[in-house]
Amino acid sequence: MPNSSIPTSAELIQSGFVRRRKWIARGMKTFLFLCAALSVFVTTAIVFVLVRDSWDFFANVPLFDFLFGTMWTPVFANPQFGVLPLLAATLQTAGLAMAIAVPFGLIMAIYLSEYARPAVRETIKPALEMLEAVPTVVYGYFALLVMTPFLQGFVPGLKGINLLVPGIILGIMILPYVVSVSEDAMRAVPNSLREGGYGLGMAKWQVATRIVIPGAFSGITAAFILGMSRAVGETMVLAVAAGQNPNLTWDPREGAATITAYIVQMSLGDVAHGSIAYQSIFAVGLLLFVITLLFNIIGFYLRRRFREAY
Amino acid sequence: MSTTTQGALSAATTNQTAFDAVRKAKQKDILFATGGLVVMALAMTLLLALIGDLVIRGATRIDYGFLTSYPSRLPERAGILSAWVGSLLVMLVTAFLAIPIGIGAGLYLEEYARKGWLSNFIEINVSNLAGVPSIIYGLLALGLFVYGFSLGKTILVAGMTLALLILPIVIVSIREAVRAIPRIIKEGAYGLGADQWQVMWSYIIPAARPGILTGAIVGLSRAIGETAPIITIGALTFIAFLPPAPVTGEFPFISFAWLNDGFTVLPIQMFNWVSRPQAEFHVAAAATGVVLIALTFSLNGIAIWIRYRLRQGYRN
Amino acid sequence: MTDTTMTIDKTKTDTQPAAPTKAEPDMPPAIKPAAERDPLRARIENFSFYYSNGFQAIKQVDMPILDRKITAIIGPSGCGKSTLLRSLNRMHDLYPGNRYEGKVILEPEGENLIGPEADPVLVRLRVGMVFQKPNPFPKSIYENVAAGLRVRGIKKRAVIDEAVETALRRAAIWDEVKDKLHGSAYDLSGGQQQRLCIARGLAPNPEILLLDEPTSALDPIATAKVEDLVQELSETVTIVIVTHNMQQAARISHRTAFMYLGEAIEFGDTNQIFTNPKHPRTESYITGRYG
Ligand SMILES: Nc1ncnc2c1ncn2[C@@H]1O[C@H](COP(=O)(O)OP(=O)(O)OP(=O)(O)O)[C@@H](O)[C@H]1O
Ligand SMILES: [Mg+2]
């Protein structure tokens, strides 16, 4: 009964089929490994490029002057490279963003995870996802051409280019991300813990604030830290609406270039390859990378610890 | 938790205070729930108002001429022809690179890698790359592709840059899709004598297709709106020509000359117009924004729909 | 592994008697009486298996597998029947940390299936498997049966068509599916799916077919069909079947092994095991006192 046109394993070996397949499988395994290893290569390449191109920069500008200098005038005849003005603007807008995203994000996440019916949650989550997809340059448009003129009617002294509005818009922008990450964390808190709280006669809000939030604390913190990292690294809103003028100010009604906005500004003009101005964008890029890397690593470990807890 | 217990117990000493406590808790609950709803509604309304405003300002500017004209110094003649063609070609390169590489990396991490320091390291790497600001990818491309490899400020470089940028997104969604494939299906395939690659190619990849598709779509919708890395590689913002067509009249009918051409893309065009002082350009910017939002929303809508359909999942 | 060790000559296999004297000395007494009359297809020798968590699921099992006979493995739940069966086509290699000890010698070549030099993929090309739960692929009925052929690089449409039909007929499901070969396998009933999986396992002509409780999900009629089928198959294929159903083992198998807590307590002629068990545990299990 066995069909003679179907090769036996011996025939498969004799015909070289088995060997051929083995080579293909090995080759593909190597290829897949290379694909996965590409991520390591990319990280290495980022560090390599940033360090290499800012190497000469730091040969000319002492690290101390770079980190603590208060003047950033790269194209002046006598250029100054103190990064504090850029850093101050970056931290102010990111701080404003967090001031919006933390409380609102927390309330929305609690609402979604503890109060909302499943049907409501299933509609709101995709909607949040859609909002995350809005291109950032569009948010820049909102900040510069819609929100700023609108708020100028309420905030006296608000300049046309300022830090306040991009900060607010940035907060709205990272809100969906903060909500979805912290909501995931809250939902991962086991129901048995919640039931323990209800068993003690707690109301919903008490369970939320005394059991769910402490239980999901590291996950929620991770959401905030990763949100902060995004706010620090965001570019287009700031390049459009916060101005491209380095300006050491603590008044958010004024405009000031952030690290990212500076990189955009220099890229738009024709910077000579190899000039100190060219190197300076890699130097500030390196600083930005280090800051976000720190946030990301802390966020990664908090999240992982949280996942392991449950 | 113990303080609550005490509070609850002492409140329960008399019926009246217990009743009060319950009522208060109820009130606070309602306050909390309404608070959540109000914040949510506020955020949504604000965003909807902003998007609505954009549509009202920009939609009327979108017509045949707008889609088929080059940018111009005269705002009323300006169009997005070179921008959308550029976006399309860059996305082509991005998809062509990011999808296979993402599938490869996702399969490797999920199906091949033995738990150990190496796979752990790669894993941390991928999740870290997902958080690297997009402008840093721009600097990478500027230092490595544009000057290091002397590739210039071309469609190819932009496509490669965005491919690296969206790779973590694609990898994560492919891994999830692969993880969802039931073990007994895999064992069935191995049981027939298939080697690992045969199992991947004939069973895992086809079964993970919806997940791969959603990952690719979400990744591309992110890439289509990215501006910063493309500005950083120094893409020109005023492009009044189209790259050579990929299909030619003569043998071999396919040309890759467009890969090495200068270009602009939709978000850069929008950025350029937003930055102009003239209000007419702002209208053109709004119109471009409408096109961008329509593109990203429909891409994400498709992805959400596929995922929704997928929920039905395996019937076995 | 080199090509020569794997090369077998089918015609020789059929005529050449196994050399019982060679195997005899290291065989434990429990197995000795049965192993002498019929040619062997495989010998499980001093075989142990450890799961990655360190749990020893199989403890020094010795067992012959007779050529073109049905060997049934019975025993209470959790005693290691599936574990043993899955060892025979190296399924455990799919998960890291699992460990085999001892030998599974394929006769007459004398190749050790679980040795470090044996390629699990090659083993699975020779030893097919049908699982406890029906697991059709999310493809058409036709493609499910053709899957094993495609794995072997067969591309000729006519060959595949013929093999698919033969396998479906042998699995006694041809009449039910012949009009919807290109419909989804998921649209079949559980019993049909299981017979489809048997057809899938048969199509590439494996040398040994492993069946892990193939009828546990089936109704009596479908069960009877599968039993008939298995008996018919044993004329051409060596079969090892795990079953919870002792009547089934008694009805269809030639040899029966009784396992308990990872050990093969007793092995012998099915008739002998069911009418005259030597070991008290076997006796209490088949008379239904536990299990
Ligand atoms: N992946 C695993 N890791 C660790 N131990 C396992 C694993 N799979 C099975 N076991 C254990 O090995 C023993 C044998 O399991 P096995 O599945 O072979 O039993 P079985 O005889 O087939 O039972 P059943 O009749 O219920 O199918 C059991 O004690 C089980 O708990
Ligand atoms: Mg079992």
Image (tube, coloured by chain):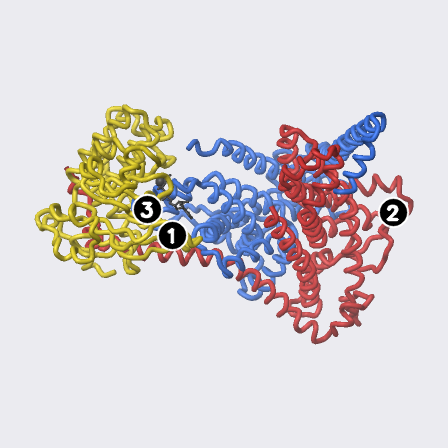
Chain colours: A red, B blue, C yellow
Q: Report the amino acid beneath label 2.
A: Leu
SS category of the residue bearing label 2: loop
User: Disc 3, disc 1: CB below 8 Å?
Assistant: no
Q: Report the amino acid beneath label 1.
A: Gln
Residue A290 higher or lower than C258, as above or below: below
Query: Does residue C184 appear anywhere in the picture?
Result: yes
Residue C5 higher or lower than B76, as above or below: below
Residue highlighted by disc 2: A158
Q: Chain of mark 2?
A: A
| The quadrant where residue C81 appears | top left
Q: Position of residue B47 (x, y in %)?
A: 73, 36
**Lower position in the chain sequence, tag 3 or tag 1:** 1
SS category of the residue bearing label 1: strand
Report, in whole angstroms, how far the alpha carbon at label 2 lies from the one at label 3.
74 Å
Residue highlighted by disc 3: C86
Q: Is residue A235 left or right of residue C2?
A: right
Residue B22 higher or lower than A77, as above or below: above
Residue at image position (54%, 64%) is: B150
Q: Report the amino acid beneath label 3.
A: Arg
Q: Position of residue C135 (x, y in %)?
A: 36, 36
Q: Is residue B45 left or right of residue A155?
A: left
Report, in whole angstroms, how far the alpha carbon at label 3 lies from the one at label 1.
15 Å
| The quadrant where residue B22 appears | top right
Q: Chain of mark 3?
A: C
Q: Position of residue C227 (x, y in %)?
A: 23, 31
Residue highlighted by disc 1: C56
Q: Is residue A234 left or right of residue C274?
A: right
